[in-house]
Amino acid sequence: MVARTPSPSPRGPTPSLAPSPSRGPAAASQEAAEARERTAELLREIRRIEIQTSRLVTQHLAGSYQSVFRGQGIAFAEVRAYEPGDDVRAIDWNVTARTGEPHVKLFTEERELTVMLVVDMSASLDLGSREHDKRHLVARLAATFAFSAIQNNDRVGLIGFTDRVEVFVPPRSGRKHVLAVIQRVLSHVPEHRGTSPAVALEYLSRLHKGHGVAIVISDFVDALGGERSGGGGEGGTEAEEKRLEHALKVAKRRHDVIPIRVEDPLELELPALGLLTVEDLELLDLGGDHVIDLSASQAKRYRGEVEAERRRIDRLMRKLSLPMMSIRCGDDWQKPLVAFFARRNRRLRA
């Protein structure tokens, strides 16, 4: 596996107001001020995401969400007098016998759903060659589904993963809960390396037995394994692919699974720049900066390996009949979401 491209700047620690005890008073004061500024900027970014995604939900997705994602079944609502044209199979014979007049049962759909955001939190999301990095794009996508859910009184939870589950937020409803979920996505510092959606999906299957919606948002970098995660060459890669396929199959039996791939244009095709110093975010365990050869031949080889990995992911999703959205940093991410809801509406009406 070839490592994806470097981040222009390393991701800092989680904002903290506690000064370091080993620093002098002036340094501690400056550190506290910087921490407050990082926290304030984080809150401003969360507010920007809320405004942007809430507007999208209100203007374009209102009503679509409810028709696209079904509830858990039907629930009894009331009994009323039979009217010509009513289905005779709905007659309530007990009430009919008691009153002497035919009555029918009415049912309504049980609307409450649990929407689980299964979100990649690996270090490779810190890549960003456009206005925002992939992590900010992931936060916007997650927020759109979350605000759509709470507008319909559904609950939203979060499973954040690298090569293991690092974050779990139990499903709840309400605006404050959604804002807390967005904050976790933006501020979490990954503790482990690699990317394994299979681990998160297995966790979801053990955790939530009822029907729900699973929004899987990831860059899928190294998601099918490789020399690091596979434990040895092609065999390890094949084992990881089978594990992901099985995890998706199990999740699909219980949930409406929606895979979304986020990408940055720079990671798809590197320019031929010759020798280049890069920062390893996730894959190669290089430690610190490293000089790599980005000659024309190496850039071509990299492009081929990236395309091969993307094709394997696409092939797996097609095999499981899971249409996947691919959204790139710098592109309009709202249009693909609106188109997604429209396509699912047409498919359900067909």
Image (spheres, rainbow, N blue to C red):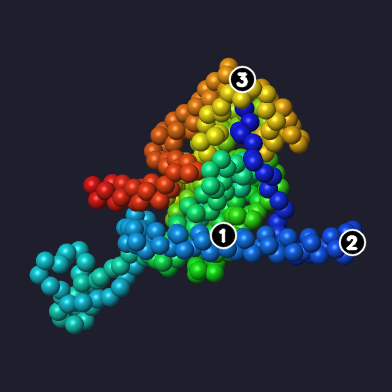
Which class describes the residues within 10 Å of circle 2: few (<14), some (14-19), or many (20+)?
few
Q: CA distance from mark 1 to mark 2?
A: 31 Å
Residue at disc 1, secondary structure:
helix
The amino acid beneath tag 2 is: Gly
Q: Is residue 299 above or below residue 114?
A: above
Q: Which mark is residue 292?
A: none
Q: Is any part of residue 110 visible from this angle?
A: yes
Residue in front for this viewpoint, 15 or 188: 15
- Whether pointer 3 and pointer 2 mark residues with C-beta atoms closer than 8 Å, the reply is no
Q: Is residue 330 left or right of residue 34?
A: left
Q: Residue at x 15, y 81 (%)?
A: 100
**Mark before the other along the chain sequence, 1 or 2:** 2
- The amino acid pointed to by label 3 is Ser
Q: Secondary structure at mark 2?
A: loop
Whole-percent x, y for residue 240 in the image:
59, 33
Q: Residues within 10 Å of mark 1 (few under 14, many from 20)?
A: some
Q: Which residue is mark 2?
A: 24
- Quadrant (top left, top right, bottom left, bottom right) of the N terminus: top right
- Earlier in the chain: of badge 3 and badge 2, it is 2
CA–CA distance between discs 3 and 1? 38 Å
Element at badge 3? loop
